[in-house]
Amino acid sequence: MDAAGVAAALRESSGVRVVSGGTKLGWGRPIEAPELSVSELDAIVEHNEGDLTAILQAGVPLAAAQQRFADAGQMLALDPPDDGATIGGVIATGDSGPLRHRYGGPRDLVLGVQVALPDGSLARAGSKVIKNVAGYDLAKLMTGAYGTLGVVTEVSVRLHPVSRQKLTVVVRRDDPRALVDAAIELTHRPLEAERLDLRWEDGAGTVLVQLTGPSAPDRAGGVDGDVVEDDDKLWAAQRAAQRGPVVLRVSTTQQGLADVLAAANEHGAVCVARAALGLAWLRLEAADAELVTKLRARLGTCVLLDAPAELRRAVDPWGPLMAEPLMRRVKARFDPYDTLNPGLLLA
Amino acid sequence: MDGGRQLIEELRRICGDEHVVTEHHALRTYESDGLLQYAAVPRAAALPGSGDEVAAVVRACHQAGAPWVARGSGSGLSGGALPIEDGVLVVLSRLRRILEVDLPNQRVVCEPGVTNISISAAVGPSHFYPPDPSSQIVCSIGGNVAENSGGAHCFKYGFTTNYVCGLEVVLPDGSLMTLGGKELDQPGYDLCGVFVGSEGTLGVATKITVRVVPTPESVRTLVAFFDSPGHAGHAVSAVVSAGVVPGAIEMMDNLSIGASEQMGHAGWPTDAGAALLVELDGPEQECDARFGEIERMCEEAGSNDIRVARDEAERQLFWKMRKAAFPAMGRVSSHYYVQDSVIPRTRLAEVLDRIDELSREYDLKVANVFHAGDGNLHPLVCYDGHSEGEAQRAEELAGEIVVACVDAGGSITGEHGVGVDKKRYMPKMFSEADLDAFQKLRCAFDPDGLANPGKVMPTPRLCGEVPGPYREHPLEKAGLAERF
């Protein structure tokens, strides 16, 4: 099915579950609807090496795109978990990994979208150049909207050069507060780190600072910790901890991360966090609605990602939505008959 | 504006008599923004003193059915803050407080009238706010939000939208809404992201939360001269392909070098075909390692005159030359028309050839100053406004340049915004279906079309009720607008 086919199918449909790689179908409120898959839209439409941009159809597996870019010494600076994830799913869920520290999230890297709307139209917004302010930034609207406003069929993205030289400095602390203090000291230095993460597990924690570029070995001396040159495993573990039986994504501030780590410590959770961004993932072996509610009261915004369907029924996976009336107005204009992932985001 | 007198009384009640301007001569202060080709005098200008007053002003306009336009410092270059005759201009210059500097969390919360530069000043020298439009000394952060402003350093650091994480906005019905905050990734739609760059057509921001970052340890700047912009373009490609991301790469052509030299007196060769200003910033060791590479690549691309700024004063001089290019053009030509198109960087040489060809065809000079890293051209079409028909010829030529850039896979505007100036080019870049999708968003925020009407969209459109039954709008009945 091509993009026009997706749009035509939407026009005829009274309700669909939008699917691409199928790796994150357990996120949001559980819903029942016939599946509409974009996984056949799997062409890398353009890779403009000299311009460091690319156009990808939604169903392109992220790993396949990365392989193609790597051949030219480039990358799409998105490294969320899930080797089976497609670019469409990553954009729809706004998922991200440790590279977000330096390059931003999907919202910051998507230059334009083509989107199929429930009225059967196929619309584009943005462009394929890295700088553009013409028209509304619907690419940002669609990013993280979980396919509830339109079905993204194609995206144009900005790429970045890959640095050959890289290493990670590991700083250890066994107290959550001390660990966050150590991280904050580093986030306020002009390190230009590629990645800057926290990890808390089994009563001890690390700050991980990845440096890249020809001067990385020299600069590593400025950070008081152990240098790990072969650091792929460290970062794979950071990404992996964003998935689990129950995962809560916490939106807080840099200082607020101390509370998140303390909570992780008390509940035997693994916590990984982007130290400079105030984003944390709490991975629990199990949780009930009461615990989720308690953590929200303590930590603020917590979105329940991975979780059994019964838990996502027992407690709202999203928590309170800011500006919900306006969100409903936007939804009503783009998807007036609630065709797209009905009930997944707005009940 | 029916009941205009009543609305003005209401505005006076909200803002105080001294903060509502209604005299024609006083209102002329606001008749244009930074794009002087357009002028319109509003019915009234209101200068609210707080976010609540802004909300009350907008609510009063909504109740009166009066269109309104928000204005920050008025330095925009696309006519985005051009007033609506018979409408209200909401001037935000009194909202200039920095409300909170939260340095530990790298956030600043401020009012929209705060100037761009004062955010960096508030967090410096350890931190700074990266988006740096050339007008940063005067332009307001509220205007930056409306336009999603860029600047010379955005190739490396990104645009306003990458730094704004929270907004308090007044919607066109006068309601206050909080979008995002200090925390990233709030659940639900990224309405903060979509508001940034919406050119005042979705509402007005009354409180803005931005992210600030550590100031780079080291800055190294050079200028290299080339025989032609094409040669300089090769140097840019070489630098970027080598995986170096400079803080800024700016190019000037022969005409702009000559004009700037008259103002800046930097001793730059006025016979050079192009000047490339490259600035590398970051950790000292990394800058040292990379700077030599850049010099070598400039040489390989054909430059035999490379000057490295020896100190901060010389660096400032280099930047003065770059920033003088627009104002200095006034010495070369009595009038000029600035474009803001973007092209994929690899198409630079062919697009510049096309611009040369058009320049000869129209018999008008075109100077070029541009952000070479991101392919954002600023062709300045020079003309004599006093010569019969020349202004129109200049506008036609500028339009042809826009078309050439869009045909090359680019955009009609990289940082100045669509405003009134470029809305006629929107159909070159977007289909009817695309524009319909834009209108869906607009209708969600502003179903009555009162916020900055007549900007961005090429033709006036109305919002239907959703999803209820069809009702004819009075303007539609009168044949003045078509229904979306």
Image (cartoon, coloured by chain):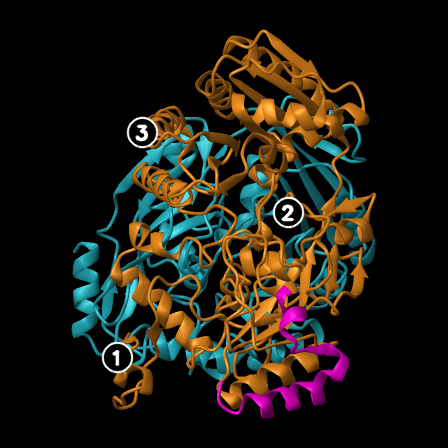
Chain colours: A cyan, B orange
Q: Which corner quadrant of the image does residue A221 belong to?
A: top right
| Marks 1 and 3 belong to one chain | yes
Question: Please, what is the dominant secondary structure of the magenta stretch?
Answer: helix
The residue drawn where x is 40% and y is 70% is B441
- Chain letter for the residue marked with disc 3 in the picture: B
Q: Which of marks 1 and 2 is in front?
A: 1
Compared with A48, B214 (above or below) is below
Mark number displayed over residue B361: 3
User: Which numbered tag is attached to residue B141?
Assistant: none
**Chain of the residue where label 1 is placed in the rendered structure:** B
Q: In which quarter of the image is residue A16?
A: bottom left
Question: Mark 2 highlights which residue?
Answer: B131
Instruction: Please tell me which residue lies in front, A99 or B457.
Output: B457
Q: Name the residue under label 1.
A: B479
Tell me if I can see residue B197 in this picture: yes
Is B250 covered by the magenta stretch?
no
Where in the figure is residue B25, as x and y percent of width and height?
65, 69
Q: Which residue is drawn at the image coordinates 58% and 29% (left, top)?
A: B249
The first of marks 1 and 3 along the sequence is 3
